[in-house]
């Protein structure tokens, strides 16, 4: 995957008016600390780190400023009632940020479809992978749209694209894409997430799609504390074989970093080398197959000190560069690689079994 990676961002997503008690783009939750969830400072820390490249080991990036998405595009993915209600939310600052976030995902997809880049990153917030067809909660309460789904629908309108895979590595379940593409034969959705995490009632391994989409949804609810060996097995034994079977023309990644070791939300044991490995696996698959490339949408990750390094790890793996300099590894290396548990082995075994259903379509 030679050449620079394009990064689409928007200053609209980092304005200080978005900084608020508790939950950022979500309704206020005063019990949470101010730097939790989608606070603009968290995103700004990632942008600053990647731009400054403090250790000189970052893959080449080409930065571009995103424009807001149109309402018509949103209605192709979400319930029109949900779209109207969300756009009518009185929190105009969050609405503008959400529109620019989805616009970045659409622009990143266009970069790959038009061969301006083999990989492109929508580095924006709010995260949107919990936004199902009808959103979440009461329409209009949460200001978010499913950027990964918009990327997939945008790609499927291109004559060169027949199938898209969405790989969600956020520690929370990618319920948005699962719901939107539940009956679609053209989109494979795979989610690696923590067992019984958000969203409530979703993420189980019995959820395999339905109708024409039967077999096109694979969930891997990994036990808490899982680290690099578990994720490596999930990628090599389930995700890569699923790509081999489905043969997508484009890969979309919901890139969440709340599985990092220091994250207040995740409780997993991942480090920058683990995200580098995930990016490397996807790069190698895309390079070895007739795949246009990889689009990333920025999702969760709430450790301002570590998410920038984790992001650099993913980008370097995707771009063919080395793992980034990671000062955390020198102190915590033994804790970053817990052995795979019996529970994790069982989850991956069931994931392998799901491949047979996918192949039988």
Image: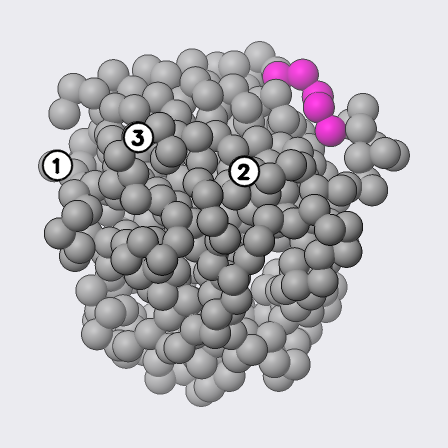
Where in the figure is residue 38, as x and y percent of width and height?
59, 64
The answer to whether residue 48 is magenta is no
Numbered circle sitting on residue 100: none
Numbered circle sitting on residue 211: 1
Q: Residues within 10 Å of mark 2 (few under 14, many from 20)?
A: some
The label nearer to you, 1 versus 3, is 3
Q: Marks 2/1: CA distance?
A: 39 Å
Q: Does residue 347 appear anywhere in the picture?
A: no
Residue 131 position by quadrant: bottom left
Name the residue beneath numbered marker 3.
289
- Relative to 254, say whether 137 is above or below: below
Name the residue beneath numbered marker 2.
320
Q: Upstream in the sequence, badge 2 or badge 1?
A: 1
Residue at 44% in and 30% down: 284
Q: Upstream in the sequence, badge 1 or badge 3?
A: 1
Q: Upstream in the sequence, badge 2 or badge 3?
A: 3
Q: Quadrant of the N terminus?
A: top left
Extent of the magenta region: 336-340
Residue at 69% in and 65% down: 48
What colour scheme was applied to this rendering of the protein? Answer: one colour
Main secondary structure along the magenta-highlighted residues: loop
Residue 246 position by quadrant: top left
The answer to whether residue 338 is magenta is yes
């Amino acid at each position: 995957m030679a050449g620079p990676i394009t990064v689409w961002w928007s200053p609209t997503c980092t304005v200080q008016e978005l900084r608020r008690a508790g939950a950022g783009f979500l309704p206020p939750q005063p019990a949470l600390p101010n730097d939790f969830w989608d606070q603009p400072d968290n995103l700004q820390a990632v942008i600053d780190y990647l731009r400054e490249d403090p250790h000189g080991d970052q893959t080449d990036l080409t930065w571009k400023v995103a424009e807001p998405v149109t309402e018509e595009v949103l209605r192709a993915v979400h319930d029109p009632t949900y779209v109207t209600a969300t756009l009518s939310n009185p929190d105009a600052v969050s609405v503008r940020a959400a529109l620019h976030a989805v616009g970045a995902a659409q622009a990143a997809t266009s970069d790959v479809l038009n061969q301006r880049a083999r990989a492109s990153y929508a580095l924006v917030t709010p995260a949107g992978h919990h936004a199902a067809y009808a959103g979440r909660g009461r329409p209009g309460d949460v200001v978010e749209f499913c950027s990964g789904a918009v990327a997939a629908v945008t790609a499927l309108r291109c004559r060169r694209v027949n199938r898209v895979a969405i790989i969600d590595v956020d520690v929370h379940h990618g319920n948005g894409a699962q719901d939107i593409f539940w009956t679609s034969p053209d989109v494979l959705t795979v989610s690696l997430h923590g067992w019984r995490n958000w969203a409530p009632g979703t993420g189980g391994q019995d959820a395999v799609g339905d109708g024409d989409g039967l077999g096109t949804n694979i969930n891997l609810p990994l036990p808490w504390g899982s680290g690099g060996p578990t994720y490596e097995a999930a990628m090599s034994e389930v995700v890569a074989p699923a790509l081999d079977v489905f043969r997508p023309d484009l890969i979309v990644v919901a890139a969440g970093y709340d599985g990092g070791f220091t994250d207040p939300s995740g409780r997993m044991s991942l480090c920058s080398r683990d995200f580098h490995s995930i990016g490397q696996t996807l790069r190698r698959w895309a390079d070895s197959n007739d795949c246009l490339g990889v689009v990333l949408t920025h999702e969760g990750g709430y450790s301002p000190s570590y998410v920038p390094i984790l992001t650099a790890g993913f980008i370097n793996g995707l771009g063919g560069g080395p793992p980034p300099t990671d000062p955390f590894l020198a102190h915590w290396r033994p804790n970053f690689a817990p052995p795979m548990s019996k529970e994790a082995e069982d989850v991956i075994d069931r994931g392998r079994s799901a491949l047979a259903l996918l192949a039988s379509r």
